[in-house]
Image (spheres, rainbow, N blue to C red):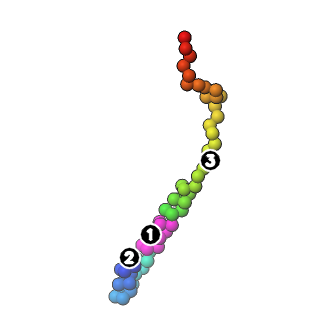
Amino acid sequence: MRGRSAEAEREGWLGEIEGLQVSLAGAEDKLAQLDAGQARTRRAVDVGMPASPRTTGRSNAVAKP
């Protein structure tokens, strides 16, 4: 995209230059959003151990008759 922008400047295509600048700014903004989203999901979150009175003290042992 930067190459197209340089060509538009060289050729004097003012409308094309503006359109490319807007597109480039939008793409850079989107990349920044994606990077920020990945940074948020990389953090470890401690959710603790689940506690339930029904599961406390259970065993998988089978009683013998």
For mark 2, what is the residue? 1
- Left or right, 9 with respect to 35, comes to left
What's the CA distance linking mark 3 and mark 2? 43 Å
Residue 27's disc is 1
Looking at the image, which residue is at 49% across and 68% down? 29
Neighbor class of circle 3 (other Cα within 10 Å; few <14, some 14-19, many 20+) is: few
Instruction: Identify the image quadrant of residue 24.
Output: bottom left
The crowding category of the residue bearing disc 1, from other C-alpha atoms within 10 Å (few below 14, some 14 to 19, many at least 20), is: few
| Mark 1: amino acid | Ala
The amino acid pointed to by label 3 is Asp
Q: How many neighbours does mark 2 have within 10 angstroms: few (below 14), some (14-19), or many (20 or more)?
A: few
Residue at image location 47% in from the left, 70% down from the top: 28
Provide the secondary structure element on which disc 2 rests.
loop
Q: Which residue is mark 3?
A: 46
Which residues are the magenta region? 23-32
Mark pair 1, 3: CA separation = 34 Å
